[in-house]
Amino acid sequence: MNLMIEKARPQDLEAITALYGAVCGYLADKPYNPGWRRDIFPAREDAEQYLAADGLYIARDGEEAVATLALTPETGGALCIHEVAVRPDRQRQGISTAMLDFAAKEAAQRGARSLRLYVWEGNAPAIRAYEKNGFARMGKEDIGLGEFGLDWFYRYEKRLEG
């Protein structure tokens, strides 16, 4: 594998939208689906917003788009991770770990003190991945998605070397 992670460009939106769709399709019948629905969330509009805010990243193996994530600044010197998506046929190959490592390096370069993310309490695979990658559970919060059956989210943080 020859993974390259970089800031997404407008011409990457089609590949990122297809990646979101593939992950949504994979999660559709899973009990740990965090509310992802094809063409609803995450969708092209979400990627466009992150791109406009200069926070959308894409991972490629050669020419093939295999993963994406977004980063946004948060209060308290944190950078928040959003929409970590790895193509279903490329999962369990270390790509999410590479994306999280990249996010930590990017956050450190931006002067952030920590990385933060929110994960639905029922998403056990994601929770395991984040904990394996050094994120610590900091609390349980209602982030306003109860109408979708997603009442509680865990807030995870990873402190960065200063």
Image (tube, rainbow, N blue to C red):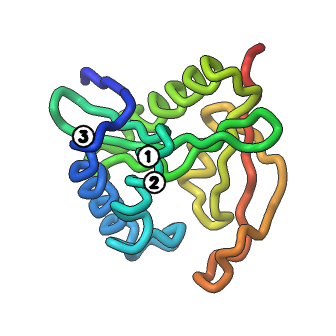
Position in image of residue 8 (x %, y %): 34, 37
Residue at x 60% of width, y 43% of height: 72
* Label drawn at residue 131: none
Residue at x 40% of width, y 53% of height: 47
Q: Nearer the viewer, residue 25 or 48?
A: 48
Q: Classify 122 as above or below 92.
A: below
Position in image of residue 24 (x %, y %): 36, 66
Position in image of residue 116 (x %, y %): 69, 42
User: In the rendered structure, are the residues bearing label 2 and label 1 in contact, judged by CB atoms less than 8 Å apart?
Assistant: yes
User: In the rendered structure, are the residues bearing label 1 and label 3 in contact, judged by CB atoms less than 8 Å apart?
Assistant: no
For label 2, the residue is 49
Residue at x 38% of width, y 31% of height: 7
Query: What kind of residue is marked 3?
Result: Ala
| Disc 2 residue crowd, few under 14, some 14–19, many 20+, Cα 10 Å | few
Element assignment for label 1: helix
Query: What kind of residue is marked 2?
Result: Gln
Badge nearest the viewer, 2 or 3: 2
Q: Marks 1 and 3, Cα distance to the nearest angstrom?
A: 20 Å
| Disc 1 residue crowd, few under 14, some 14–19, many 20+, Cα 10 Å | few
Q: Earlier in the sequence, mark 2 or mark 3?
A: 2
Q: Nearer the viewer, residue 111 or 18?
A: 111
Q: Earlier in the sequence, mark 1 or mark 3?
A: 1
Q: Marks 2 and 1, Cα distance to the nearest angstrom?
A: 5 Å
For label 1, the residue is 52
For label 3, the residue is 65
